[in-house]
Amino acid sequence: MTPRQTVDVRAHRWLMIVGALLTAGALLLLSLLPDPPAEAVAMTAWVERGHPLLMWSNELLFLAVICWGAGARGLVSAGLAVPSARIDVGRTALTVALGALVVVLLAVGRLVYPVFEIDLSAEVVALLVSSTFGALHVAFLGFAVAAVTLGWSTRAGLAGRAVGIVAAAAFVVGSFPWLTPNWWNSVVPVMIAAWGVFLACVTRTE
């Protein structure tokens, strides 16, 4: 590996680490929100009460997707000496997860920022809120698949596989935030950060 390639790999590692930490911060802020009301008419008041948390989560998520996407793409590409179906599945799953976070980004952004000062009806607000949590569900499932498949292909060996399996199980459970307690919804973002940092540090590079 040339000095230039070494610098690029180091930069991609840090991008992925920063992206994982920012993602965890954004998801942690969302986990601090109270449970949304079941009635659409009460949803606007719920958004207003949680406006600061939603706004800062949205800002962090924008940077998180860019950093994590760029870092992961660079690291995984640097380690592809030979074609690998497992790594391709993991890379696709991570792309799906980050794409779902973009949906969260758009939905939350529309909740907290006025666009042409257009007022949203209670039904539209309810749709955006439900879409946010639906996209989070998809994101966590994508992270779970990525944790297993990418963890199986790191230089950490059995430890990497074990971490990937444990992380995947936590992410699957965390993909149902409307069924799990708030304390667990706050723990899962921390595990996202830990897994993302671990993966960045042990991903093979050629």
Image (cartoon, grey):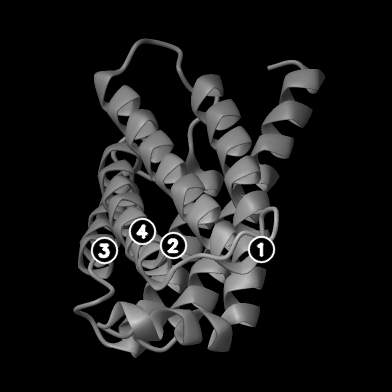
> Which badge, 4 or 2, is on the more N-terminal residue?
4
Task: Tell me the crowding category of disc 4: few under 14, some 14 to 19, or many 20 or more residues within 10 angstroms, Cα based.
Answer: many
The residue closer to the viewer here, 127 or 123, is 123
Q: Amino acid at mark 1?
A: Tyr
Instruction: Point out the image quarter for the N terminus.
Output: top right
- Which picture quadrant has residue 9? top right
Q: Which residue is mark 1?
A: 113
Residue 32 in sight: no
**Which percent across, then down, holds residue 116?**
70, 53
Q: Secondary structure at mark 2?
A: helix
> Which badge, 4 or 3, is on the more N-terminal residue?
4
Report how far apart the C-alphas of labels 2 and 3 lie in the structure.
Answer: 12 Å
At horizontal 49% and vertical 32% (from top left) the residue drawn is: 204
Q: Which residue is mark 3?
A: 175
> Which badge, 1 or 2, is on the more N-terminal residue?
1
Q: Secondary structure at mark 3?
A: loop
Q: Which residue is mark 4?
A: 136
At horizontal 31% and vertical 45% (from top left) the residue drawn is: 142
Task: Tell me the crowding category of disc 1: few under 14, some 14 to 19, or many 20 or more residues within 10 angstroms, Cα based.
Answer: few
Cβ atoms under marks 4 and 3 closer than 8 Å: yes
Report how far apart the C-alphas of labels 1 and 2 lie in the structure.
Answer: 27 Å
